[in-house]
Image: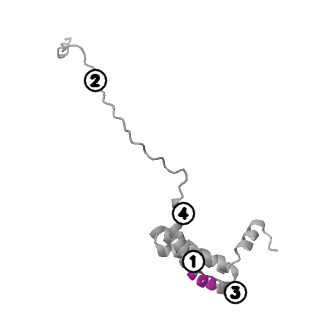
Amino acid sequence: MTIPPPPNYPPSVGPQQAPEVTVVLQTEVMPEPARWDWTWLQISRNTKCLVVSVVTAPMWAAALGDVRTEQHEPGAWFMAGAAVCVALWLDHRRKGFLTRVLVWTTALGAFGALPVFSTLVTLMTGSRS
């Protein structure tokens, strides 16, 4: 059995030199973000859409009122709920001015034509009187 020769290391050049360290300090002060971020409300956009829907919502409320008197109240609730869901879905997909007006119109029309508060009381308590 033969033993291999020792590895061929390069000769030592002298004392080890210390590695160079570079420190970079960033002196800019980053502005602290606002504690309360209310931009998700989009107050100006929603206000403009609400002003337009004040004109269009009574027409939708009249249609829901007709459905409520001619057909039945649950049918009007279903129609209003379906319209609000479709309007919210469209607004989520397109994020346009007209779709937001549609959301406000369907919501305000439902509140104008249907007994929202008495229905909530009935749902919570189970009492119809």
- Front residue of 7/89: it is 89
Q: CA distance from mark 4 to mark 2?
A: 54 Å
**Sequence order check, earlier mark of 2 and 1:** 2
Q: CA distance from mark 1 to mark 4?
A: 18 Å
Mark 2 residue element: loop
Residue drawn 78% across and 68% down? 126
Q: Residues within 10 Å of mark 2 (few under 14, many from 20)?
A: few
Three-letter code, disc 3: Thr
Question: What secondary structure do most residues of the magenta stretch adopt?
Answer: helix
How far across and how far down the image is residue 82, in percent? 58, 75
The reply to whether callout 1 and callout 4 are in contact (CB within 8 Å) is no
The reply to whether callout 3 and callout 4 are in contact (CB within 8 Å) is no
Mark 4 residue element: helix
Disc number placed over residue 69 in the picture, else none: 3
Mark toward the viewer: 2 or 3: 2
Q: Is residue 59 magenta?
A: yes
How far across and how far down the image is residue 26, in percent? 37, 38
Q: Residues within 10 Å of mark 4 (few under 14, many from 20)?
A: few
To which quarter of the image does residue 61 belong?
bottom right
Q: CA distance from mark 3 to mark 1?
A: 20 Å
How far across and how far down the image is residue 122, in percent? 76, 70
Side of 25 where 57 appears, left or right: right
Residue drawn 54% across and 50% down? 35
Q: Quadrant of the C terminus?
A: bottom right
Mark toward the viewer: 3 or 1: 1
Query: Circle 2 sits on which residue?
Result: 19
Q: CA distance from mark 2 to mark 1?
A: 70 Å
Three-letter code, disc 2: Pro
**Sequence order check, earlier mark of 1 and 4:** 4
Q: Residues within 10 Å of mark 3 (few under 14, many from 20)?
A: few
Look at the image and give the residue range highlighted in magenta: 55-63
Query: Circle 4 sits on which residue?
Result: 41
